[in-house]
Amino acid sequence: MISSEIDREGYLNPQIILYIPTRQMQTSMKIDEIQIPSTGIDLDELTKVLIRKAIDMKGGKKVHAAKMLGMSGATLLYRIKKCGMNV
């Protein structure tokens, strides 16, 4: 679960909750029930937030974080590099 929304200026607003279920997570919300704010969302920033949270949740182990996000370790490393992240 990610606690963020992009505000009008393009910054994360941590007061709004956006639920992103993963394959392994049991949830009552289905992926097609996710609501996109009318102000829009920055997918690159959302990707960064999801990657950071998954890596933190898995104690820094990127391979485990990748599995949590439903991707391979190579794909995670590609996205980290593409987003210019230092993790």
Image: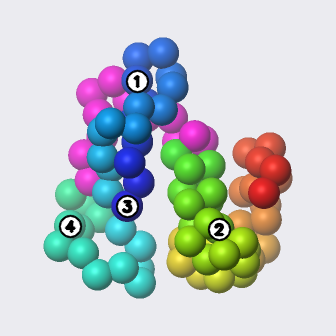
- For label 3, the residue is 1
Q: Quadrant of residue 32?
A: bottom left
Question: Real-space Cα distance between discs 4 and 2?
Answer: 23 Å
Q: Nearer the viewer, mark 1 or mark 2?
A: 2
Secondary structure at badge 1 equals loop
Q: Foreground residue, 57 or 32? A: 57
Tell me whether the residue at label 2 lies in contact with that at label 3, contact meaning CB atoms closer than 8 angstroms.
Answer: no
For label 1, the residue is 7
Q: Earlier in the sequence, mark 3 or mark 1?
A: 3
Determine whether the residue tagged by mark 4 lies in a helix, strand or loop: loop
Please say whether residue 56 is one of the residues in the magenta stretch.
no
Q: Is residue 77 above or below residue 40?
A: below
Residue shown at 21%/57% (left/top)? 33
Disc 1 marks a residue whose amino acid type is Asp
Q: Position of residue 25 (x, y in %)?
A: 36, 79
4 vs 3, front mark: 3
Q: For numbered disc 3, what is the local secondary structure?
A: loop
* Cβ–Cβ under 8 Å for marks 4 and 2: no
Residue at the spot of label 2: 55
How far apart in space, not on screen, are marks 4 and 1 (Cα)?
Answer: 23 Å
The label number, if any, that marks residue 29 in the structure image: 4
Amino acid on which the number 3 mark rests in the picture: Met
